[in-house]
Amino acid sequence: MTKYKLSDFDYDLPEDLIAQYPADKRTHSRLMVVQRESGKIVVDKFYNILKYLDSSYFMVMNRTKVIPARLYGKKPTGGNVEILLLEEINEKKWRALVKPGRRLKKGNKMIFGNGILKGKIIKQLPKGERIIKFDSARDFFSIIDEIGEIPLPPYIKRQASARDETRYQTVFASQKGSVAAPTAGLHFNKKLLKDFKENSINKAYVNLKIGLDTFRPVTTEDIEEHDIHSEFCQIEKQEAKKMNHALSSGKEILAIGTTTVRTLESFVENSTVNSGTKRTKLYIYPGYKFKIIDALLTNFHLPRSSLLMLVTAFGGYDLIMKAYKKAVEGKFRFFSYGDAMLIL
């Protein structure tokens, strides 16, 4: 088996191909269809995706909801502060990034939204992170819905707008907690979901709370030495039941997004999907043996990233890198607001 290095997952990407805005309509992004057995690559529009799928498939989607995790506030002395919520520790405590990092230390207090939310740094962590304990008179999430801003990925070089509040969110999102979107799901609108159902392609949901670590590049040339980030994920009993019924009926599992893959593969034992809650550190790179995934819908990922490694593990290194070369040459749009790839 080929042993891949980090440099094998690098590719040249012109900056102007990094999508800064979503497509005019969710289903109007481009779609690259990659056939693993034949090696055939087809270019189409996302609204034609059902040309390539039939009732033999069962779809699994991550219904995590992006929270308005960027908060602007002030110190009691009047200085401006900015924090980016990364992960909920419990109801009132969050791991977060802070600005200005050098000046915000343990014990410092902050005020947000004219005092409806207060925070205090109770611990300093590596990489500029802090643990912040919040104090609010009412539900924390209802407050940040009012005063927070959608946290666009670092490669989108603009301020979030009102449009991002809906477009950087899937139409089926319901479980709050992510600070990044499950981007493969962004291409669906409610009509297309209805079309899937009418074509007898049923679905189930998982929940994986996506953090900013998903954007961090791998830095070790020996990819096996990379310490993959951990993420909270969950499969509810009724959803596991739907998946296991689909498996027993001989359906092929179509995972919508890499986070869905990571969740499913973390909960499968002996070809059965278990329900429950856990933190997963599953790291998928070429050589990984997939347990139940038969097809994958995903966006185009960053060079030297663990997500690109996952996709090449599933689709085959040579074929996927060929597809990426074709995508660059064809001026596909990359990353979160970019185009989609369907691997069959």
Image: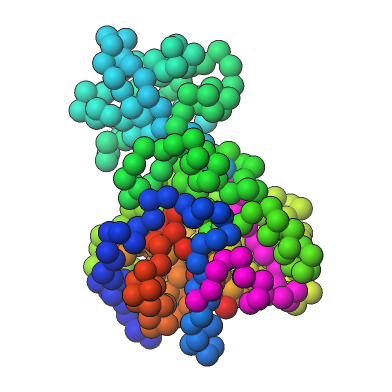
Question: Viewed as shown, does residue 292 lie left or right of 216?
Answer: right
| Residue at the image point whose x is 38% and y is 81% from the top | 322
Residue in the foreground of this view, choosing between 93 and 186: 186
In percent of width and height, residue 261 lies at 55, 63
Question: Viewed as shown, does residue 279 lie left or right of 329?
Answer: right
Work out which residue is located at the far front of the displayed protein and give it: 24
- Does the magenta-highlighted stretch encompass residue 63? yes
Q: Quadrant of residue 112?
A: top left
Vertical position of residue 119 compared to residue 279: above or below: above
| Residue at the image point whose x is 41% and y is 77% from the top | 323
In percent of width and height, residue 5 lies at 27, 74
| Residue at the image point whose x is 74% and y is 67% from the top | 201
| Residue at the image point whose x is 31% and y is 68% from the top | 223
Quarter of the image with the C terminus in it: bottom right
- Does the magenta-highlighted stretch encompass residue 281? no
Q: How many marks?
A: 0
Question: Viewed as shown, does residue 44 lie left or right of 122?
Answer: right
Residue in the foreground of this view, choosing between 61 and 24: 24
Look at the image and give the residue range highlighted in magenta. 43-64
Work out which residue is located at the far top of the displayed protein and give it: 77
